[in-house]
Image (cartoon, helix red, strand yellow):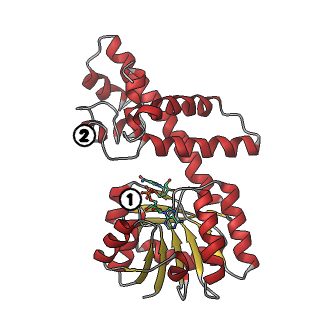
Amino acid sequence: MARVGFIGLGNMGGGMAANLAKNGHDVHAFDLSEEALARARQAGCLPVADAAAAADGAEAIITMLPAGRHVAGVYTDAVFPHAAPGAVLIDCSTIDVATARQLASDAAAKGLEAVDAPVSGGIAAANGGTLTFMVGGSDAGFRRAQPFLEDMGKAVIHAGASGAGQAVKMCNNLILAGTMIATCEGFALAEKLGLDPQVFYDISSKATGQSWSMTSYCPLPGVGPESPADRDYQGGFAAALMLKDLRLAMAAAAEAGATLPLGTRATELYEAFATEHDNLDFSAIIKTAQGKA
Ligand code: NAD
Protein backbone atom coordinates (compact mmCIF):
# COMPACT_ATOMS: atom_id res chain seq x y z
CA MET A 1 0.00 0.00 0.00
CA ALA A 2 1.25 3.43 -0.86
CA ARG A 3 1.16 7.04 0.13
CA VAL A 4 -1.08 8.89 -2.33
CA GLY A 5 -1.53 12.65 -2.66
CA PHE A 6 -5.06 13.48 -3.85
CA ILE A 7 -5.96 17.03 -4.95
CA GLY A 8 -9.58 17.92 -5.77
CA LEU A 9 -12.19 16.25 -3.57
CA GLY A 10 -15.39 17.41 -5.30
CA ASN A 11 -18.30 15.35 -6.61
CA MET A 12 -15.96 12.88 -8.31
CA GLY A 13 -12.67 13.20 -6.39
CA GLY A 14 -14.32 12.76 -2.98
CA GLY A 15 -15.51 9.24 -3.79
CA MET A 16 -12.31 8.33 -5.63
CA ALA A 17 -10.08 9.34 -2.70
CA ALA A 18 -12.38 7.43 -0.33
CA ASN A 19 -11.97 4.27 -2.44
CA LEU A 20 -8.18 4.57 -2.34
CA ALA A 21 -8.33 4.85 1.46
CA LYS A 22 -10.75 1.89 1.62
CA ASN A 23 -8.21 -0.12 -0.39
CA GLY A 24 -5.57 0.56 2.27
CA HIS A 25 -3.66 3.52 0.79
CA ASP A 26 -2.43 6.36 2.99
CA VAL A 27 -4.27 9.20 1.25
CA HIS A 28 -3.08 12.77 1.92
CA ALA A 29 -5.96 14.79 0.55
CA PHE A 30 -6.41 18.47 -0.30
CA ASP A 31 -9.22 20.67 -1.60
CA LEU A 32 -9.89 24.41 -1.34
CA SER A 33 -13.24 23.57 0.29
CA GLU A 34 -13.34 22.91 4.04
CA GLU A 35 -16.49 20.82 3.58
CA ALA A 36 -14.75 18.57 1.09
CA LEU A 37 -11.81 18.16 3.48
CA ALA A 38 -14.17 17.19 6.33
CA ARG A 39 -15.86 14.57 4.12
CA ALA A 40 -12.44 13.20 3.14
CA ARG A 41 -11.47 12.83 6.81
CA GLN A 42 -14.69 10.87 7.47
CA ALA A 43 -13.85 8.64 4.52
CA GLY A 44 -10.48 7.68 6.00
CA CYS A 45 -8.18 10.18 4.23
CA LEU A 46 -5.78 12.56 5.98
CA PRO A 47 -6.72 16.16 5.10
CA VAL A 48 -3.62 18.33 4.58
CA ALA A 49 -3.07 22.11 4.55
CA ASP A 50 -2.30 22.62 0.87
CA ALA A 51 -1.60 20.93 -2.45
CA ALA A 52 2.15 20.96 -1.75
CA ALA A 53 1.61 18.94 1.43
CA ALA A 54 -0.47 16.42 -0.53
CA ALA A 55 2.33 16.05 -3.08
CA ASP A 56 5.16 15.79 -0.55
CA GLY A 57 6.51 12.25 -0.24
CA ALA A 58 3.68 10.66 -2.28
CA GLU A 59 4.26 7.69 -4.59
CA ALA A 60 1.32 8.79 -6.71
CA ILE A 61 -0.18 12.28 -7.02
CA ILE A 62 -3.72 12.27 -8.34
CA THR A 63 -5.65 15.38 -9.44
CA MET A 64 -9.43 15.61 -10.06
CA LEU A 65 -10.03 19.28 -10.81
CA PRO A 66 -12.57 21.30 -12.82
CA ALA A 67 -10.52 22.26 -15.91
CA GLY A 68 -7.09 22.53 -17.56
CA ARG A 69 -6.19 25.86 -15.98
CA HIS A 70 -6.73 24.44 -12.46
CA VAL A 71 -4.58 21.38 -13.25
CA ALA A 72 -1.80 23.48 -14.82
CA GLY A 73 -1.85 25.84 -11.81
CA VAL A 74 -1.66 23.03 -9.25
CA TYR A 75 1.10 21.23 -11.21
CA THR A 76 3.19 24.41 -11.53
CA ASP A 77 2.72 25.68 -7.97
CA ALA A 78 2.67 22.46 -5.96
CA VAL A 79 3.14 19.19 -7.82
CA PHE A 80 6.33 19.88 -9.82
CA PRO A 81 8.19 21.59 -6.95
CA HIS A 82 7.17 18.96 -4.36
CA ALA A 83 6.86 15.61 -6.16
CA ALA A 84 9.35 13.04 -4.91
CA PRO A 85 11.72 11.61 -7.53
CA GLY A 86 9.97 8.60 -9.04
CA ALA A 87 6.45 9.74 -8.18
CA VAL A 88 3.80 9.09 -10.83
CA LEU A 89 1.46 12.01 -11.64
CA ILE A 90 -2.08 11.01 -12.62
CA ASP A 91 -4.54 13.64 -13.79
CA CYS A 92 -8.09 12.25 -13.87
CA SER A 93 -9.77 15.59 -14.69
CA THR A 94 -11.30 16.18 -18.13
CA ILE A 95 -9.05 18.79 -19.76
CA ASP A 96 -7.82 19.82 -23.22
CA VAL A 97 -5.35 17.62 -25.07
CA ALA A 98 -2.77 20.40 -25.47
CA THR A 99 -2.50 21.04 -21.70
CA ALA A 100 -2.34 17.29 -20.97
CA ARG A 101 0.55 16.89 -23.44
CA GLN A 102 2.34 19.99 -22.14
CA LEU A 103 2.13 18.77 -18.52
CA ALA A 104 3.46 15.34 -19.50
CA SER A 105 6.43 16.87 -21.31
CA ASP A 106 7.12 19.30 -18.42
CA ALA A 107 7.00 16.29 -16.06
CA ALA A 108 9.40 14.31 -18.26
CA ALA A 109 11.83 17.26 -18.25
CA LYS A 110 11.84 17.00 -14.45
CA GLY A 111 12.34 13.22 -14.53
CA LEU A 112 8.73 12.52 -13.53
CA GLU A 113 6.20 10.24 -15.24
CA ALA A 114 2.78 11.83 -15.90
CA VAL A 115 -0.35 10.31 -17.43
CA ASP A 116 -3.75 11.73 -18.37
CA ALA A 117 -6.48 9.41 -17.10
CA PRO A 118 -9.94 10.96 -17.58
CA VAL A 119 -12.95 8.91 -16.57
CA SER A 120 -16.17 7.62 -18.00
CA GLY A 121 -18.92 7.22 -15.39
CA GLY A 122 -20.49 9.79 -13.11
CA ILE A 123 -20.71 10.43 -9.38
CA ALA A 124 -22.28 7.04 -8.63
CA ALA A 125 -19.41 5.25 -10.41
CA ALA A 126 -16.86 7.42 -8.57
CA ASN A 127 -18.45 6.50 -5.23
CA GLY A 128 -18.88 2.85 -6.17
CA GLY A 129 -15.35 2.41 -7.54
CA THR A 130 -16.68 1.43 -10.97
CA LEU A 131 -15.19 4.16 -13.17
CA THR A 132 -13.58 3.45 -16.54
CA PHE A 133 -10.19 5.16 -16.99
CA MET A 134 -8.77 5.95 -20.44
CA VAL A 135 -5.08 6.55 -20.02
CA GLY A 136 -2.64 8.52 -22.15
CA GLY A 137 1.09 8.17 -21.52
CA SER A 138 4.11 5.93 -21.94
CA ASP A 139 3.98 2.17 -21.27
CA ALA A 140 6.01 2.76 -18.10
CA GLY A 141 3.67 5.54 -16.93
CA PHE A 142 0.63 3.37 -17.61
CA ARG A 143 2.08 0.45 -15.62
CA ARG A 144 2.87 2.76 -12.68
CA ALA A 145 -0.61 4.36 -12.67
CA GLN A 146 -2.60 1.17 -13.30
CA PRO A 147 -2.75 -0.28 -9.73
CA PHE A 148 -3.96 3.05 -8.30
CA LEU A 149 -6.59 3.43 -11.01
CA GLU A 150 -7.75 -0.17 -10.52
CA ASP A 151 -8.52 0.68 -6.90
CA MET A 152 -10.98 3.33 -8.12
CA GLY A 153 -12.50 1.71 -11.19
CA LYS A 154 -13.68 -1.35 -13.05
CA ALA A 155 -11.67 -0.83 -16.25
CA VAL A 156 -8.29 0.81 -16.94
CA ILE A 157 -7.42 1.08 -20.63
CA HIS A 158 -4.20 2.35 -22.20
CA ALA A 159 -5.37 4.63 -25.03
CA GLY A 160 -1.95 5.64 -26.38
CA ALA A 161 0.67 8.37 -25.85
CA SER A 162 0.19 11.50 -23.70
CA GLY A 163 -3.13 13.23 -24.41
CA ALA A 164 -4.71 10.07 -25.89
CA GLY A 165 -6.89 9.55 -22.80
CA GLN A 166 -8.33 13.05 -23.18
CA ALA A 167 -8.71 12.58 -26.95
CA VAL A 168 -10.72 9.35 -26.48
CA LYS A 169 -12.88 10.98 -23.81
CA MET A 170 -13.84 13.95 -25.99
CA CYS A 171 -14.48 11.88 -29.14
CA ASN A 172 -16.64 9.49 -27.10
CA ASN A 173 -18.67 12.33 -25.59
CA LEU A 174 -19.03 13.98 -29.01
CA ILE A 175 -20.73 10.77 -30.19
CA LEU A 176 -22.79 10.62 -26.99
CA ALA A 177 -24.09 14.19 -27.45
CA GLY A 178 -25.05 13.41 -31.05
CA THR A 179 -26.85 10.16 -30.28
CA MET A 180 -28.65 11.73 -27.33
CA ILE A 181 -29.94 14.68 -29.37
CA ALA A 182 -30.95 12.36 -32.25
CA THR A 183 -32.76 10.04 -29.82
CA CYS A 184 -34.59 13.01 -28.28
CA GLU A 185 -35.65 14.26 -31.70
CA GLY A 186 -36.85 10.76 -32.65
CA PHE A 187 -39.03 10.55 -29.54
CA ALA A 188 -40.32 14.12 -30.02
CA LEU A 189 -41.34 13.44 -33.63
CA ALA A 190 -42.86 10.06 -32.68
CA GLU A 191 -45.02 11.88 -30.13
CA LYS A 192 -46.13 14.50 -32.70
CA LEU A 193 -47.01 11.74 -35.14
CA GLY A 194 -49.27 10.18 -32.51
CA LEU A 195 -47.14 7.09 -31.79
CA ASP A 196 -47.25 5.38 -28.41
CA PRO A 197 -43.74 6.12 -27.02
CA GLN A 198 -43.48 2.63 -25.52
CA VAL A 199 -44.31 1.00 -28.85
CA PHE A 200 -41.85 3.28 -30.63
CA TYR A 201 -39.18 2.33 -28.05
CA ASP A 202 -39.94 -1.40 -28.37
CA ILE A 203 -39.43 -1.24 -32.13
CA SER A 204 -36.59 1.28 -32.46
CA SER A 205 -34.58 -0.25 -29.60
CA LYS A 206 -34.49 -3.48 -31.62
CA ALA A 207 -33.99 -1.72 -34.95
CA THR A 208 -31.28 0.58 -36.29
CA GLY A 209 -32.28 3.55 -34.10
CA GLN A 210 -30.80 1.71 -31.14
CA SER A 211 -27.94 3.30 -29.21
CA TRP A 212 -26.73 3.56 -25.60
CA SER A 213 -28.65 6.85 -25.37
CA MET A 214 -31.86 4.97 -26.14
CA THR A 215 -31.51 1.62 -24.41
CA SER A 216 -29.37 2.45 -21.36
CA TYR A 217 -30.25 6.09 -20.73
CA CYS A 218 -33.61 6.73 -22.37
CA PRO A 219 -34.40 10.48 -22.26
CA LEU A 220 -38.18 9.93 -21.99
CA PRO A 221 -39.61 9.18 -18.50
CA GLY A 222 -41.36 5.84 -18.05
CA VAL A 223 -39.75 4.25 -21.10
CA GLY A 224 -36.74 1.91 -21.08
CA PRO A 225 -34.64 1.13 -18.00
CA GLU A 226 -34.61 3.57 -15.08
CA SER A 227 -32.64 6.69 -16.01
CA PRO A 228 -32.35 10.35 -14.87
CA ALA A 229 -35.50 11.06 -16.96
CA ASP A 230 -37.42 9.08 -14.31
CA ARG A 231 -36.02 11.35 -11.57
CA ASP A 232 -36.98 14.62 -13.22
CA TYR A 233 -33.50 14.73 -14.80
CA GLN A 234 -31.76 15.12 -11.42
CA GLY A 235 -28.35 13.51 -10.84
CA GLY A 236 -26.57 11.79 -13.73
CA PHE A 237 -24.28 13.77 -16.04
CA ALA A 238 -25.06 17.51 -15.92
CA ALA A 239 -25.80 19.37 -19.17
CA ALA A 240 -23.08 21.87 -18.15
CA LEU A 241 -20.49 19.06 -18.12
CA MET A 242 -21.63 17.80 -21.53
CA LEU A 243 -21.26 21.36 -22.82
CA LYS A 244 -17.76 21.55 -21.33
CA ASP A 245 -16.76 18.31 -23.11
CA LEU A 246 -18.28 19.45 -26.42
CA ARG A 247 -16.33 22.71 -26.23
CA LEU A 248 -13.13 20.72 -25.62
CA ALA A 249 -13.93 18.53 -28.63
CA MET A 250 -14.65 21.55 -30.85
CA ALA A 251 -11.42 23.26 -29.75
CA ALA A 252 -9.47 20.08 -30.51
CA ALA A 253 -11.24 19.82 -33.90
CA ALA A 254 -10.30 23.41 -34.78
CA GLU A 255 -6.69 22.73 -33.83
CA ALA A 256 -6.60 19.48 -35.82
CA GLY A 257 -8.40 20.96 -38.85
CA ALA A 258 -11.42 18.62 -38.52
CA THR A 259 -14.86 19.85 -39.65
CA LEU A 260 -17.70 18.65 -37.41
CA PRO A 261 -21.05 20.13 -38.50
CA LEU A 262 -23.06 17.91 -36.15
CA GLY A 263 -20.68 18.64 -33.27
CA THR A 264 -21.02 22.37 -33.98
CA ARG A 265 -24.82 22.16 -33.85
CA ALA A 266 -24.80 19.93 -30.75
CA THR A 267 -22.60 22.51 -29.01
CA GLU A 268 -25.01 25.31 -29.95
CA LEU A 269 -27.98 23.30 -28.66
CA TYR A 270 -26.28 22.52 -25.33
CA GLU A 271 -25.12 26.14 -25.03
CA ALA A 272 -28.72 27.36 -25.37
CA PHE A 273 -30.03 24.62 -23.05
CA ALA A 274 -27.39 24.97 -20.33
CA THR A 275 -27.92 28.71 -19.88
CA GLU A 276 -31.15 27.85 -18.05
CA HIS A 277 -30.80 24.19 -17.12
CA ASP A 278 -27.10 23.61 -16.47
CA ASN A 279 -27.73 21.34 -13.47
CA LEU A 280 -30.21 19.04 -15.21
CA ASP A 281 -28.96 15.75 -16.65
CA PHE A 282 -27.84 16.09 -20.29
CA SER A 283 -30.74 13.87 -21.47
CA ALA A 284 -33.12 16.69 -20.45
CA ILE A 285 -32.21 18.23 -23.84
CA ILE A 286 -35.36 16.35 -24.94
CA LYS A 287 -37.16 19.48 -23.66
CA THR A 288 -35.56 21.39 -26.57
CA ALA A 289 -36.76 18.80 -29.08
CA GLN A 290 -40.24 18.95 -27.53
CA GLY A 291 -40.23 22.76 -27.64
CA LYS A 292 -40.43 22.88 -23.82
CA ALA A 293 -36.92 24.13 -22.93
P1 NAD B 1 -16.34 19.49 -8.73
O1 NAD B 1 -16.46 20.93 -9.10
O2 NAD B 1 -17.41 18.84 -7.92
O3 NAD B 1 -14.95 19.25 -7.96
C1 NAD B 1 -13.77 19.93 -8.22
C2 NAD B 1 -13.09 20.20 -6.89
O4 NAD B 1 -11.82 20.80 -7.12
C3 NAD B 1 -13.87 21.16 -5.98
O5 NAD B 1 -14.11 20.54 -4.73
C4 NAD B 1 -12.94 22.37 -5.85
O6 NAD B 1 -13.00 22.97 -4.57
C5 NAD B 1 -11.60 21.73 -6.09
N1 NAD B 1 -10.56 22.65 -6.52
C6 NAD B 1 -10.61 23.60 -7.50
N2 NAD B 1 -9.41 24.23 -7.60
C7 NAD B 1 -8.60 23.66 -6.68
C8 NAD B 1 -7.24 23.86 -6.30
N3 NAD B 1 -6.49 24.80 -6.89
N4 NAD B 1 -6.74 23.09 -5.31
C9 NAD B 1 -7.49 22.15 -4.71
N5 NAD B 1 -8.78 21.90 -5.03
C10 NAD B 1 -9.32 22.66 -5.99
O7 NAD B 1 -16.14 18.72 -10.11
P2 NAD B 1 -16.37 17.14 -10.38
O8 NAD B 1 -17.77 16.92 -10.82
O9 NAD B 1 -15.79 16.38 -9.26
O10 NAD B 1 -15.47 16.97 -11.69
C11 NAD B 1 -14.07 16.89 -11.63
C12 NAD B 1 -13.54 16.57 -13.02
O11 NAD B 1 -14.10 15.33 -13.47
C13 NAD B 1 -13.90 17.62 -14.07
O12 NAD B 1 -12.79 17.81 -14.91
C14 NAD B 1 -15.08 17.00 -14.80
O13 NAD B 1 -15.20 17.45 -16.14
C15 NAD B 1 -14.73 15.52 -14.72
N6 NAD B 1 -15.88 14.59 -14.78
C16 NAD B 1 -16.98 14.82 -14.02
C17 NAD B 1 -18.05 13.91 -14.09
C18 NAD B 1 -19.31 14.12 -13.26
O14 NAD B 1 -20.30 13.41 -13.49
N7 NAD B 1 -19.32 15.00 -12.28
C19 NAD B 1 -17.97 12.80 -14.93
C20 NAD B 1 -16.81 12.59 -15.68
C21 NAD B 1 -15.77 13.50 -15.59
Which residue is at a point 46% across and 86% down the rendered structure image?
Answer: 3
The residue at the far top in this view is: 193
Instruction: Name the amino acid, label 1.
Output: Asn
Above or below 174: residue 103: below
Where residue 11 is drawn, which disc sits there?
1
Which residue is at a point 50% across and 37% down the rendered structure image?
Answer: 177
**Quarter of the image containing the N terminus?**
bottom left
Residue 124 in picture, x, y percent from top left: 32, 57
Above or below 226: residue 132: below
Residue 223 in picture, x, y percent from top left: 26, 32
Q: In this view, does 231 lie to the left or right of 177?
A: left
Is the distance from the Cβ of mark 1 to the nearest ligand 1 atom less than 8 Å? yes
Instruction: Name the amino acid, label 2.
Output: Arg
Marks 1,2: beta carbons within 8 A? no
Above or below 118: residue 84: below
Which residue is at a point 33% across and 35% down the rendered structure image?
Answer: 218
User: Picture quarter containing residue 123?
Assistant: bottom left
Q: Which residue is labeled 2 in the image? A: 231
Q: Is residue 158 at least partly visible in the picture? A: yes
Residue 286 in picture, x, y percent from top left: 39, 27
Disc nearer the start of the sequence (1/2): 1
